[in-house]
């Protein structure tokens, strides 16, 4: 792939249960070792519902949920559990998760672990004048928190705020679905770029195909433990093992 024209790199964080572009799968899966993002959100919710159900701070997150789920804290908890069990990427859930994660980061319960190649490569691209942006189903607030607290993943380990490297953040609210071509057109427009000047990196072949469909450059980042790629994907898509392969 000719990337000489690329002046902008759009990265997927990717946290779903089987995938990882810049963050190891263990961040969500290895519950025994880390109290980490998705399990942390679920575990911390009952306390928040008990103490903050009517708090002005919590109200906007609560009120974004459907009426049925807002009938009681128990109904709310059930609804969140159902959505999270199915890994539903709906904006009001993503926004709530971002809120629930703040305390975990602030308490040092976990940090956001990046694969070892990620921070050095982001810094190198930034130093070379490339524009870096993020596109995740996680809310923009959750993305900013993630980059504020990058580290080893271990509780109370050192963190580095990498937000200075990132020019813009996109989620399903300000860009749209990650599997729709139009979302990538919108992102390129917002960044003031042509689609062909942007390179999108994702573990998800459907997202890569959506970006390619509108003329964006896109590659699959195939990390250990990611969902296996089909023979068709291997033949048709550019696949890399780490960011240094660009
Ligand atoms: C720090 S952002 C949290 C990411 C997240 O919640 C998520 O669901 C990621 O999903 P994606 O569709 O972007 O893989």
Image (cartoon, rainbow, N blue to C red):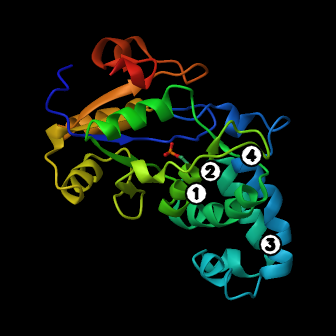
Q: Is residue 209 above or below residue 179?
A: above
Task: Look at 52% across and 18% down and name the residue there.
Answer: 228
Quadrant of residue 45 in the image? bottom right
- Mark 3 or mark 1, whichever is nearer to me: 1
Q: Earlier in the sequence, mark 2 or mark 3?
A: 3
- Mark 2 or mark 3, whichever is nearer to me: 2
The residue carrying mark 1 is 145
> How far apart are the alpha carbons under marks 4 and 3?
17 Å
Q: Position of residue 118 (x, y in %)?
A: 49, 31
Q: Residues within 10 Å of mark 4 (few under 14, many from 20)?
A: many
Side of 93 where 176 appears, left or right: left
The residue carrying mark 3 is 48
Q: Compare residues 127 and 136 and report the one nearer the observer.
A: 127
The residue carrying mark 2 is 149
Mark 1 residue CB less than 8 A from any atom of ligand 1: yes
Q: Is residue 240 above or below residue 184?
A: above
Task: Look at 17% across and 55% down and name the residue there.
Answer: 192
SS under mark 3 = helix
Residue at the extreme front of the image, as rendered: 127
Q: Are marks 1 and 2 in contact (CB under 8 Å)?
A: yes
The residue carrying mark 4 is 36
> How far apart are the alpha carbons under marks 4 and 2?
13 Å
Q: Is residue 199 visible?
A: yes
- Mark 1 or mark 2, whichever is nearer to me: 2
Task: Look at 71% across and 39% down and name the residue there.
Answer: 153
Q: Compare residues 175 and 87 and report the one nearer the observer.
A: 175
SS under mark 2 = loop
- Mark 4 or mark 2, whichever is nearer to me: 2
């Amino acid at each position: 792939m000719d990337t000489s024209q690329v002046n902008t790199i759009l990265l997927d964080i990717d946290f779903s249960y089987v995938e990882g572009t810049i963050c190891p799968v263990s961040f969500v899966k290895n519950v025994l070792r880390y109290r980490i993002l998705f399990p942390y959100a679920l575990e911390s919710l009952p306390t928040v519902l008990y103490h903050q159900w009517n708090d002005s701070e919590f109200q906007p997150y609560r009120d974004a949920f459907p009426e049925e789920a807002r009938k009681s804290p128990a109904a709310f908890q059930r609804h969140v559990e159902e959505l999270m069990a199915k890994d539903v990427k709906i904006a009001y859930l993503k926004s709530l998760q971002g809120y629930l994660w703040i305390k975990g980061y602030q308490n040092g319960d976990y940090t956001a672990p990046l694969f070892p190649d990620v921070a050095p490569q982001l810094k190198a691209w930034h130093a070379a004048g490339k524009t870096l942006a993020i596109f995740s189903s996680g809310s923009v607030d959750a993305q900013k928190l993630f980059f504020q607290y990058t580290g080893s993943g271990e509780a109370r380990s050192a963190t580095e705020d990498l937000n200075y490297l990132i020019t813009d953040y996109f989620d399903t609210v300000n860009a749209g679905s990650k599997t729709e071509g139009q979302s990538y057109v919108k992102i390129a427009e917002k960044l003031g770029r042509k689609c062909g000047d942007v390179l999108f990196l994702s573990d998800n072949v459907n997202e890569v195909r959506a970006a390619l469909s509108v003329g964006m450059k896109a590659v699959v980042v195939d990390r250990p433990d990611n969902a296996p790629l089909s023979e068709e994907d291997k033949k048709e898509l550019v696949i890399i093992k780490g960011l240094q392969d660009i």
